[in-house]
Amino acid sequence: ILNVEQSPQSLHVQEGDSTNFTCSFPSSNFYALHWYRWETAKSPEALFVMTLNGDEKKKGRISATLNTKEGYSYLYIKGSQPEDSATYLCAPNFGNEKLTFGTGTRLTIIP
Amino acid sequence: NAGVTQTPKFQVLKTGQSMTLQCAQDMNHEYMSWYRQDPGMGLRLIHYSVGAGITDQGEVPNGYNVSRSTTEDFPLRLLSAAPSQTSVYFCASSLLPASGKGYTFGSGTRLTVV
């Protein structure tokens, strides 16, 4: 069983502030890293899939970076809004058709 | 496109009963999988399939069977339900993950075994 760690487990952020959280994973045999956004009572939705060391992806106010050599990825949210409240999941893939999900960072935006 | 359709949304079973959770996708995705989500545990892979006629076990396969007779459908069977199988079940599909594409998830099935 692969060890995928996300930190912090939960986070409260004032509306308008920026924030970031971390996903760490084994660096050997790495193929891709997925980020998902999961709102309460809904299904996870794909945000990013990153494969290359140094990769940076952006979607609106949300961006992510990837370091495959040391096995970590950061997700950044700029100018948090109430609709950003969700659990953010990361999941590495090691080229074997399976994703191993972390337990997520639960983000709450305080209006 | 409907995406990934899971049925039923809710189910209550008695210990020992069997049932099938249905999952269908209309995106011609080769890869389909079943996850269960339990508090504090994250999503854990039960079974997966990389194409019709091919299935394999994930992290927590015991007590579950799957089959993939068509590209579109990937049902999950509980053989003899146990309280430990109380969980929320998600079906997900994608082009092969090795291609670097994200998963599309169904809306989930909340199962309670009493």
Image (cartoon, coloured by chain):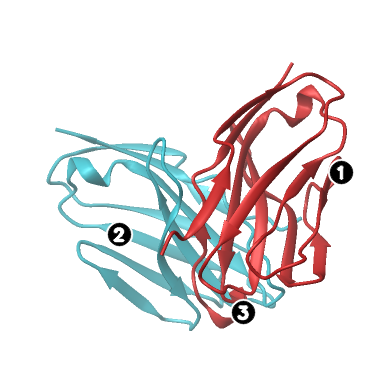
Chain colours: A cyan, B red
Marks 2/1 in contact by CB < 8 Å: the verdict is no
Circle nearer the N terminus (3, 1): 1
Are the numbered discs 2 and 1 placed on the same chain, yes or no?
Answer: no
The three-letter code of the residue at mark 2 reads Tyr
Q: Position of residue A42 (x, y in %)?
A: 41, 42
Mark identifier at residue B8: none
Instruction: Decide: is A32 above or below B5.
Output: below
* Circle 1 residue: B62
Q: For the residue carrying disc 1, how many other residues have a C-alpha within 10 Å: few (<14), some (14-19), or many (20+)?
A: few
Q: For the residue carrying disc 2, how many other residues have a C-alpha within 10 Å: few (<14), some (14-19), or many (20+)?
A: some
Instruction: Decide: is A103 above or below B80.
Output: below
Marks 3/1 in contact by CB < 8 Å: the verdict is no
Residue at the spot x=45%, y=61% of the render?
A35
**SS class, disc 1:** loop
Cα distance in 3D space between marks 3 and 1 = 26 Å
Q: Position of residue B38 (x, y in %)?
A: 62, 34
Count of numbered circles on the image: 3
Cα distance in 3D space between marks 2 and 1 = 38 Å
**SS class, disc 2:** strand
Which of labels 2 and 1 is toward the front? 1
* Circle 2 residue: A76
**SS class, disc 3:** helix
The three-letter code of the residue at mark 3 reads Ala
Q: Chain of mark 1?
A: B
Judge whether residue A24 can be spotted in this image: no
The three-letter code of the residue at mark 1 reads Asn
**Quarter the N terminus of chain B occupies:** bottom left
Q: Is residue B21 left or right of residue A45?
A: right
